Image (cartoon, grey):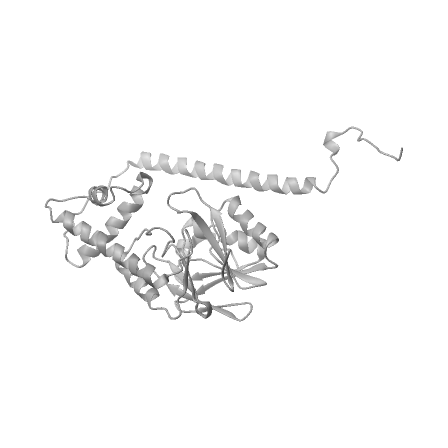
Amino acid sequence: MQVAPSVRAVQVPDPSPLHPDFTTIYLVGRGQVLTIDSGEDLERYRWMLRGYLAATEKAEIALSAVTHHHADHSANLRWLHDEFAAEVYALAGSEALLRERLPPAGVHLVEDGAAIEVAGGLSVQAIATPGHSADSACYYLESEGVLLTGDTILGSTPTTVSDLGAYLRSLERLRALPNLRVICPGHGPVIESPASYIDAYLEHRLERERQILALLAEGGERTSWQIMERIYADTDRRLRRAADLNVRSHLEKLEHEGRVRAFAGRPRQRAPAEAAEAMEEEHARQDVIRWADAYREEDRQRALLRQESPPAEEWEEPPRYELA
């Protein structure tokens, strides 16, 4: 999907309610292109990248920038490096969160405001936009007015917020960008009226704050979950943990401002034997996932190799043909 003269969208269907509509990987430039995000560690994302490039582009992925560490945006960074020898760009300070997803070589850690130079004379600015996550970044192609936002701004719904104060400041910063014409989110449709959309995002958060304060004004102490159940009553139940995260981010901001008082909770403590058993089960589960991935790749390689050799396992004596 063409978004701007130098930007295309590779939209990958995604059934998760946390990822509305689809997950999108963006290609910037021509020939030696830059990708914004890499998708999940699932074959459909890799197939879409390979298939799109093969069917639509006369291009190679030379660079890949990541908007944040969540798996649906960063899990294929190593694959892009292995498959295309792509150089990887990430915000400085995000490496601890990205951990093993970064390839062992070809990684560039860029500062807020740094430019990434793309083939064809394009310059993409990295912008630190903490709030959705501590390491969230957006990328701005000012020459074409295209802002690529990952999960900082979504195309059809509000996003989840871990630090509301930082998030509101990030939105204000994006609102002030010069020449802003279109927002390309990590999930959902492209946004053609960016200024009014960001204004609506800001107002939505302020309205949630008013709802929380009004509910607390009724009197009594409430947990974040109890507040969420009231003010997110119509939300898909599969999104309730995400909604609770947003409520907690509001409460932390209000507490910091001295507008609400918090009473410390008491974390549930697992017995050492229970914690060890849970860790062992999780390690076993992750081993199975790695084995499954290895078998899947082995099957893919085997299918390719089968194309190179005659089907000797099917015939003791293969049919022969000559002119009648």
Q: Residue furthest left?
A: 219
Look at the picture and state if 282 lies above or below 205: above
Q: Is residue 10 left or right of residue 197?
A: right
Look at the picture and state if 196 lies above or below 121: above
Pick the residue in front: 274 or 23.
23
Q: Where is residue 35 in the image (x, y as percent from the top left)?
A: 50, 58
Badge count: 0
Q: Residue at x 58, y 56 (%)?
A: 84
Q: Which residue is drawn at 14% across and 48% down?
A: 216
Q: Residue furthest right?
A: 324
Pick the residue in front: 310 or 284.
310
Q: Which residue is drawn at 78% across and 28% down?
A: 316
Q: In this view, does 76 lie to the left or right of 271?
A: right
Q: Which residue lies furthest to the top in this view?
A: 316
Q: Position of residue 16 (x, y in %)?
A: 40, 42
Tell me the quadrant of the picture where the C terminus can be found: top right
Q: Position of residue 60 (x, y in %)?
A: 59, 59
Pick the residue in front: 44 or 91.
44
Q: In this view, does 138 lie to the left or right of 324?
A: left
Q: Residue at x 32, y 61 (%)?
A: 196
Q: Where is residue 46 in the image (x, y as percent from the top left)?
A: 54, 48
